[in-house]
Image (cartoon, rainbow, N blue to C red):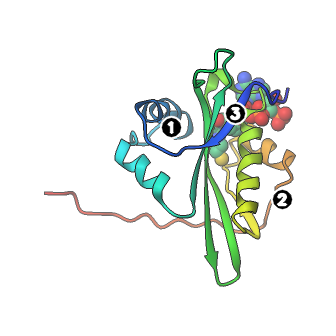
Amino acid sequence: MPVAPSEVDVSLAEEVTSELVEAFARLLPQLSPNAARLSAAELGEMIRAPGTYLLLARERPSDRQGGTILGTVTLVVFRTPSGVRANIESVVVDGAARGRGIGEALCREAVACAERAGADTVDLTSAPARAAANRLYLRLGFQRRETNVYRHVIVRPPCT
Ligand SMILES: CC(C)(COP(=O)(O)OP(=O)(O)OC[C@H]1O[C@@H](n2cnc3c(N)ncnc32)[C@H](O)[C@@H]1OP(=O)(O)O)[C@@H](O)C(=O)NCCC(=O)NCCS
């Protein structure tokens, strides 16, 4: 069932707080079980980076205090020779809050944010095994493209 607009707020993260660090420590393992914990400095780097938008979904509480962070998405907008592109990255909603339309609300706001930032297209990738995510993207109007996705992993020598 889609989330009622009164239940959740989607907003841009503008500062690093202990709440933000805690939220990523809780959410990131639900996206990538082996992901390293994000430090406050790394989150600050993301928030300050031009063209990077860190969106947060918060429960809208009745007492007007800041609500719990239930999910997040990162949008990156950059110019290429063929146009202004946007990528949606790292979509995750807390397991206890899934199925309420929060992922949809986050992705819709990311697309709106990309449009405001001048993007011509919004791309994302999702492993086929992520069934709920793939259904969500198709439901939002994303079209599956016939293209290969490649990754080169940079191997660094261990610090001495
Ligand atoms: C993909 C994800 C972000 C969706 O978040 P969400 O808030 O549950 O999204 P929505 O409520 O808008 O829609 C989720 C779909 O899962 C279904 N669903 C219902 N209850 C659910 C539950 N308890 N748990 C998971 N999915 C549920 C919804 O019905 C909906 O299905 P539909 O598209 O066929 O209608 C979330 O499942 C998640 O964080 N998954 C793990 C990380 C991940 O795979 N991220 C995507 C990376 S590409």
Q: Is residue 5 above or below residue 107?
A: above
Density class for disc 3 (Cα within 10 Å; few <14, some 14-19, many ≥20) is: some
Pointer 3 residue: 9
Q: Residue 4: x and y, percent?
A: 82, 27
Q: Residue at x 82, y 55 (%)?
A: 142
- The reply to whether discs 1 and 3 touch (Cβ–Cβ < 8 Å) is no
Where disc 3 sits, the SS reads strand
Q: CA distance from mark 2 to mark 3?
A: 27 Å
Is the N terminus in the top left, top right, bottom left or bottom right quadrant?
top right
- The reply to whether discs 2 and 1 touch (Cβ–Cβ < 8 Å) is no
Query: Is residue 39 in view?
Result: no
Image region (quadrant) for ligand 1:
top right
Q: CA distance from mark 2 to mark 1?
A: 26 Å
Q: CA distance from mark 1 to mark 3?
A: 20 Å
Some atom of ligand 1 lies within 8 Å of the CB belonging to the residue at label 2: no
Amino acid of disc 1: Leu
Pointer 1 residue: 28
Where disc 2 sits, the SS reads loop
Q: Residue 68: x and y, percent?
A: 58, 24
Is residue 114 left or right of 159 when viewed as pictured?
A: right
Q: Nearer the viewer, residue 1 or 12?
A: 12
Q: Seen from this angle, which residue lies furthest left?
A: 160
Q: Seen from this angle, which residue lies furthest top?
A: 63
Q: Residue at x 75, y 24 (%)?
A: 7
Query: Is residue 81 in view?
Result: yes
Q: Nearer the viewer, residue 155 or 110?
A: 110
Amino acid of disc 2: Gln
Q: Residue at x 65, y 60 (%)?
A: 87
Mark 2 and mark 3 lie on one chain; the one further toward the N terminus is: 3
Q: Seen from this angle, which residue lies furthest bottom?
A: 81
Q: How many marks?
A: 3
Pointer 2 residue: 143
